[in-house]
């Protein structure tokens, strides 16, 4: 049966207030008498003929489910939403999208992870120690005599990066959000360069395997003399 529009509700209310019977008004608008009766009761209760607020679809997860999903993905940022559906304790019928929605509510969204080198505990300790040793160095007395050099290997082929990590804003470089992986690809080009407070070196194309002797004779000496 057809629903009354807002305009028809106002007209029906006017007829009710004028003393017309509910059955006559129902026949005029081609609706049931109960529709007109509910309209009248609603007006007497709320003072309006507008629809009452609806509760909406019930939430599919409990507070305990939400906490389980959030903590599970905080402990392992590379888990998929479907794996959490399978791991959720107790009887449930959730979709992958429901899990994603709960993660979004917790500020966790799937993004491409930063690909970083594998750092062991010893590597991290050495870096902290080096930083502490040079904490009080100044540009004028120390850093202007230092060159920072690095070499980069540019791959000709890479994976498409379809893997995602659930992380919050500003967590791109958090250790548990970095996709640690060894260097791979289908060949590439190695280059070397250096910088200091005065400028930068020329870019050196490195061919073949670099030994300590080649590094000194073919890269450091020509760059320092130039």
Image (cartoon, grey):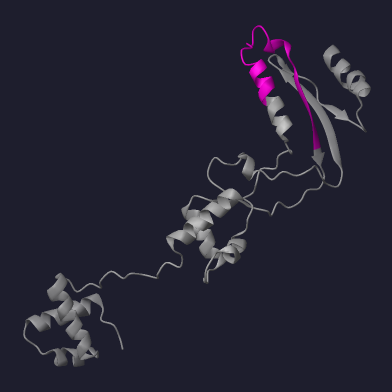
Q: Residue furthest front?
A: 90
What is the span of residues highlighted in magenta in the rendered image?
A: 128-153
**Location of residue 198 with respect to 125 vertically, above or below:** above
Residue 11 visible to an observer of this rendering: no
Residue situated in front as seen by the camera: 203 or 103: 103
Is residue 150 a member of the stretch shown in magenta? Answer: yes
* Residue in the image at 17% along x and 71% along y: 48
In the rendering, at what x and y percent does residue 15 appear?
A: 11, 83
Which quadrant of the view contains residue 79? bottom right
**Location of residue 98 with respect to 222 vertically, above or below:** below
In the rendering, at what x and y percent does residue 90 appear?
A: 52, 68
* Residue in the image at 18% along x and 76% along y: 42
Is residue 220 a member of the stretch shown in magenta? Answer: no
* Residue in the image at 88% along x and 17% along y: 222
In the rendering, at what x and y percent does residue 107 appear?
A: 49, 49
Going by the image, does 15 lie left or right of 177? left
In the rendering, at what x and y percent does residue 149 appear?
A: 77, 23
Residue situated in front as seen by the camera: 130 or 179: 130
């Amino acid at each position: 049966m057809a629903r009354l529009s807002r305009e028809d509700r106002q007209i029906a209310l006017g007829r009710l207030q004028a003393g017309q019977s509910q059955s006559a008004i129902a026949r005029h608008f081609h609706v049931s008498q109960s529709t007109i009766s509910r309209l009248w009761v609603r007006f007497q209760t709320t003072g309006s003929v507008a629809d009452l607020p609806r509760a909406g679809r019930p939430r599919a997860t409990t507070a305990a489910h939400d906490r389980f999903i959030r903590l599970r993905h905080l402990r392992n940022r590379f888990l998929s939403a479907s794996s959490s559906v399978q791991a959720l304790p107790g009887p449930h019928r959730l979709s992958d999208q429901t899990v994603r929605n709960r993660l979004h509510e917790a500020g966790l969204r799937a993004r491409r992870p930063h690909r970083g080198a594998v750092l062991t505990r010893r590597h991290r300790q050495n870096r902290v120690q080096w930083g502490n040793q040079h904490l009080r160095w100044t540009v004028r007395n120390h850093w202007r005599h230092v060159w920072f050099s690095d070499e980069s290997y540019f791959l000709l082929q890479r994976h498409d990066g379809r893997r995602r990590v659930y992380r919050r804003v500003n967590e791109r470089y958090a250790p548990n959000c970095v996709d640690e992986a060894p260097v791979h690809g289908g060949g590439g080009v190695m280059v070397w360069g250096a910088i200091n407070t005065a400028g930068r070196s020329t870019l050196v194309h490195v061919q073949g395997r670099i030994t300590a002797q080649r590094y000194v004779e073919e890269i450091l000496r020509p760059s320092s003399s130039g």
